[in-house]
Image (tube, coloured by chain):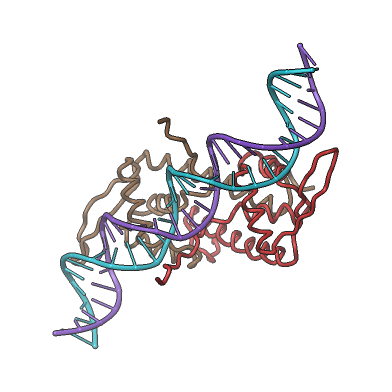
Chain colours: A red, B brown, C purple, D cyan
DNA sequence: TACCATACCTTGCGCTGCGAGGTATTATCG
DNA sequence: CGATAATACCTCGCAGCGCAAGGTATGGTA
């Protein structure tokens, strides 16, 4: 059967975007990412472990992330970093998001997208 | 059974927001809204009828919208307008969205939310 | 007579995000 | 030394949202 194709909702993929964005700046491990998202967003955004870990695994499976074990203070952690492919993906997601946010913003202000105020 | 409570994902509710926003500016009917979202967003966003109509019904059911039939050019249309309650809801959704967008934006730029650049 | 555009509607499902729970190890504290 | 909390990892199952796909009816147009 022809498997009805569903384009992903234009809203999805934000956790993925945020995680890639964090990891591009700095190597991090899952538990740390969970807290970083909360703290760096001023608690506006929270992505629990049930969100973060699956995204990490999926991104690594897709070759966007690379991981390595490291033991710090007797704590075993899995640090993730962005591959070149992941960096490209981040660029694309980031652009899409910025476009979307801009479009919504102008609509909220009652304007047409691409139209300057006068 | 205590019905596990699931807070809505922080991403959802954008169609609702856009529709309320459009209707606050101008009375509109469903079919028109579908096209308005596409055109005013510069085709960045598309919300098909399968999105718009259910949202309209839900909003009306909740008292956020009010509708009246009108026949224009032999075409029977259902025009929707925002009630005071709907206006309040729009304000809240709008604020939440703006906050969220700002938080994401600063995170993408590698900053902390609420922290000014220096 | 077709055919397209307008205008409304609902059903069913894919997919995402998430809560809830689970394991194991290390600190902390009485 | 036992108990509790914090760290750090993980997965299952579902709720809900957005959507494609389909359906109806009418008016304009070729």
Q: Nearer the viewer, residue A5 or A46?
A: A5
The image shows residue B21 at horizontal and vertical percentages of 43, 51
> Hey, which quadrant is residue A46 in on the image?
top right
Q: How many marks?
A: 0
Tell me which residue sits at (38%, 42%) in the image.
B86
Q: Nearer the viewer, residue A71 or A95?
A: A71
Task: Using residue B36 as the reference point, say whether residue A102 is left or right of it.
Answer: right
Tell me which residue sits at (47%, 55%) in the image.
A110
The image shows residue B68 at horizontal and vertical percentages of 23, 51
Task: Using residue A70 as the reference point, say whether residue B51 is left or right of it.
Answer: left
Task: Using residue B80 as the reference point, say whether residue A63 is left or right of it.
Answer: right
The image shows residue C18 at horizontal and vertical percentages of 55, 42
> Hey, which quadrant is residue B78 in on the image?
bottom left
Q: Quadrant of the N terminus of chain B?
A: top left
The image shows residue A117 at horizontal and vertical percentages of 54, 61
Is D15 drawn above or below residue B21 in the view shown?
A: above
Is B82 drawn above or below residue D18 in the view shown?
A: above
Residue at the farthest right position: A73
Q: Nearer the viewer, residue C9 or A116?
A: C9
């Amino acid at each position: 059967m022809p498997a009805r194709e569903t384009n992903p909702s234009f809203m999805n993929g934000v956790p993925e975007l945020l995680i890639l964005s964090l990891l591009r700046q700095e190597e991090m491990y899952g538990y740390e990412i969970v807290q970083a998202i909360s703290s760096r967003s001023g608690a506006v955004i929270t992505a629990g472990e049930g969100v973060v870990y699956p995204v990490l695994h999926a991104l690594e499976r897709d070759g966007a992330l690379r991981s390595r074990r490291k033991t710090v203070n007797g704590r075993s952690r899995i640090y993730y970093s962005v591959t070149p492919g992941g960096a490209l993906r981040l660029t694309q997601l980031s652009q899409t998001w910025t476009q979307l946010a801009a479009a919504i913003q102008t609509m909220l202000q009652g304007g047409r997208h691409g139209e300057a105020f006068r």
